[in-house]
Structures are given as structure tokens and as C-alpha cells.
């Protein structure tokens, strides 16, 4: 089983799928039903299948 690293206060919405060896940065938001195939930087919002960058926030 490959590791999954989640940053502090990362929000994963309903039915989000995270592929192996992916790192979700702190304060990131993953939309419902998203498929995460690559690392997600901190303070960002990603959504879709495959997930695409939506926005950053402070």
C-alpha cells in the first residue's frame, strides 16, 4: 500500500479519490467526486476528474 500524506486542515469532500503517492498540502480543499492524480500545493482548491486547479486563498 502506497502512502498518502495529508496536510493539517486539508478538506476532502464526498467521494474524492486520492491516488497513491500523492501529498495534499495544508489548508487545501478537494471538491466532491474529484480524482487527485498529483500533489496538491498548500492553500489551494482543486476539483474535477481529473482534478484541476480552481483557486488559491489565504
Image (cartoon, rainbow, N blue to C red):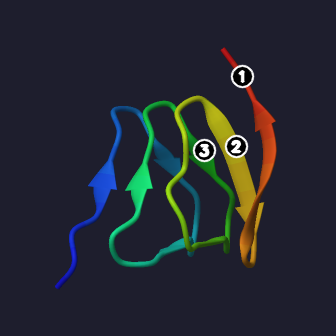
Residues at badges 2 and 1 in contact (C-beta under 8 Å)?
Answer: yes
Few, some or many residues within 10 Å of mark 3 (<14, 14–19, 20+) = many
- Residue found at x 58% / y 67%: 14
Task: In the rendered view, tell whether residue 48 sits above or below residue 55.
Answer: below
Residue 42 in the image: state x and y as whole percent: 52, 33
User: Of the residues under marks 3 and 1, which one precedes in the sequence?
Assistant: 3
- Residue found at x 33% / y 70%: 21
Residue with the most extreme left position: 1
The quadrant of the rendering that contains the N terminus is bottom left
Q: Badge 3 is on which residue?
A: 29
Residue 23 in the image: state x and y as whole percent: 39, 54
Residue with the most extreme top position: 58
Q: Badge 1 is on which residue?
A: 57
Hey, which quadrant is residue 33 in on the image? bottom right
Spatial CA span between label 2 and label 1: 8 Å
Task: In the rendered view, tell whether residue 58 sits above or below residue 9.
Answer: above
Give the structural element (helix, strand or loop) at label 1: loop
Q: How many marks?
A: 3
Give the camera-side residue of 1 and 11: 1
Residue 45: mark: 2
Residues at badges 3 and 2 in contact (C-beta under 8 Å)?
Answer: yes
Residue 8 in the image: state x and y as whole percent: 33, 33
Give the camera-side residue of 23 and 45: 23
- Residue found at x 21% / y 69%: 3
Give the structural element (helix, strand or loop) at label 3: strand
Task: In the rendered view, tell whether residue 10 sits above or below residue 34.
Answer: above
Residue 58 in the image: state x and y as whole percent: 66, 14
User: Of the residues under marks 3 and 2, which one precedes in the sequence?
Assistant: 3
User: Of the residues under marks 2 and 1, which one precedes in the sequence?
Assistant: 2
Amino acid at each position: 500500500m502506497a502512502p498518502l500524506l495529508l496536510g493539517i486542515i486539508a478538506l476532502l469532500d464526498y467521494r474524492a479519490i486520492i491516488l497513491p503517492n500523492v501529498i495534499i498540502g495544508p489548508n487545501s480543499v478537494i471538491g466532491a467526486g474529484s480524482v487527485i492524480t498529483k500533489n496538491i500545493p498548500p492553500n489551494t482548491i482543486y476539483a474535477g476528474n481529473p482534478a484541476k486547479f480552481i483557486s488559491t486563498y489565504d
